[in-house]
Image (tube, rainbow, N blue to C red):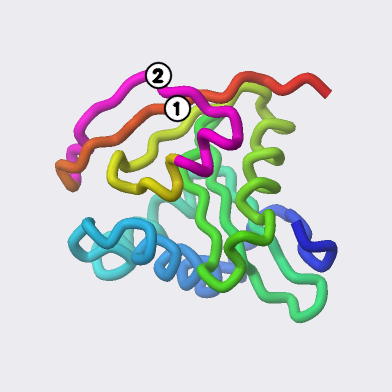
Amino acid sequence: MDNDLFVRPYRPADVDEVVSVWARAAREAHPFVVGEGEGEREQKMRDVYLMEAENWVVESVVNGTIVGLLGMLGSEIGGLFVAPEAQRRGVGRALVEHASALHGTVTLEVYQRNQRARRFYARMGFEEIGHRPEEETGHELIALRRGAVAS
C-alpha cells in the first residue's frame, strides 16, 4: 500500500465518504446487480452494515480522503471495497492483511460473476469452501476461507 495511506477505525463522521466509496466500487464490481450502490441497497449500507459491522477505512495522509472500507462481522469479511481510483495500489491487500491480523482465519463471500475479486482473493491465499444463491439478488455467492498466516 502506498506510504501515504493508513488503516484506521471507521468513525460515524465518515459515513458519507464511506458510502460514496462503497457505491462507486460496488457498481463497478457488481454491474449485474440491479440497483447496486443506490436506493434500498444504499440505505441498508447506512442503517445496517455500517452500524452492525466492525468497520475499518483506509485514509490518505496527504488529503484525508477515504479510499477503502473493510467491514468485519466477527471473523467474516462482510465487505471490502476500494475506490476505483485507488485500486491496484495495495489497499485491498492491506485490508485483507488487517483482517487476518485481527482474526487469524477469515472467511468471506464473493459473487461468482465478480471475476476480478475472485482472482484477487485467490492471489491472497483464499480457498473455496462452498457456494449458495444470495437470497436478495438470486446471484450465486462463493464462500472463501483464508487460514491464519504465520508471521
Q: Which element type, helix, strand or loop, lies under badge 2? A: strand
Is residue 126 part of the magenta span, yes or no?
Answer: yes
Q: Residue at x 37, y 46 (%)?
A: 115
Mark 2 and mark 1 lie on one chain; the one further toward the N terminus is 2
**Which residue type carries mark 1?**
Leu
Tell whether 11 sits left or right of 83. right
Tell whether 128 sits left or right of 21. left
Q: Which mark is residue 144?
A: 1
Quarter of the image where one finds residue 57: bottom right
Q: Which element type, helix, strand or loop, lies under badge 1? A: strand
Q: Residue at x 68, y 20 (%)?
A: 148
**Which residue type carries mark 2?**
Ile
**Where is 2 relative to 125, above or below?**
below
Residue 140 drawn at (x, y percent): 23, 36
Q: Which span of residues is magenta-colored?
A: 119-136
Most foreground residue, 117 or 34: 117
Residue 146 drawn at (x, y percent): 57, 24
Q: Which mark is residue 91?
A: none
Task: Tell me the residue that label 2 is attached to.
Answer: 129
Q: Residue at x 38, y 40 (%)?
A: 110
Tell whether 17 sits left or right of 137. right
Residue 59 drawn at (x, y percent): 71, 66
Cα distance between the residues tagged 2 and 1: 5 Å
